[in-house]
Image: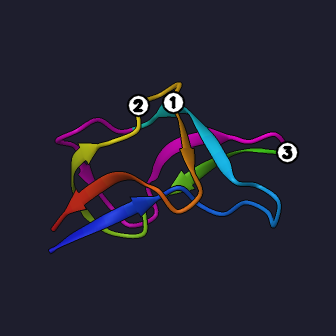
Amino acid sequence: MSADVLMPQLGETVAEGKILTWFKSEGDEIQEGDNLFEIETDKVTMEVQSIAAGKLTDIRVQAGEVAKVGAVVAVIGG
C-alpha cells in the first residue's frame, strides 16, 4: 500500500507552492507526523508533515521546483 504526498492547499487564492527543501530523502523511513518538506507560496512559508508511515519511495518534485495545489510531490510506500 502506498500513499501519495500532495501539495497542500494553503489558502483560497493559492494555486501553487515552491518546495524549498526536503527534510527526508528517497529510501528514508517516515513516521506519521514527520516533517517532510518546506514550501513557500506568495503568502506563507511552512513545513509539511507526513500523513502516513512507510518508506519515502519517490520524490517527484525536487527542491526549488513549483507544483500546483493537489499535485503528487512524493510517494510513501507501506
Query: Could you say which quadrant of the image residue 43 lies in?
Result: top right
The secondary element bearing badge 1 is classed as loop
Mark 3 → mark 2, Cα distance in angstroms: 21 Å
Q: Residues within 10 Å of mark 3 (few under 14, many from 20)?
A: few
Q: Which residue is mark 3?
A: 43
Position of residue 23 in the picture relative to residue 74 (left or right): right
* Magenta range: 24-43
**Residue 42 in magenta stretch:** yes
Quarter holding the N terminus is bottom left
At 23% from the left and 45% from the top, the residue drawn is 58
Asked whether the residues under the numbered discs 1 and 2 touch, taking CB atoms below 8 Å apart as contact, a structural biologist would say: yes
Q: Which residue is mark 1?
A: 65
At 56% from the left and 53% from the top, the residue drawn is 48
Mark 1 → mark 2, Cα distance in angstroms: 6 Å
Mark 3 → mark 1, Cα distance in angstroms: 17 Å
Q: Viewer-nearest of labels 3 and 1?
A: 1
Position of residue 29 in the picture relative to residue 50 (left or right): left
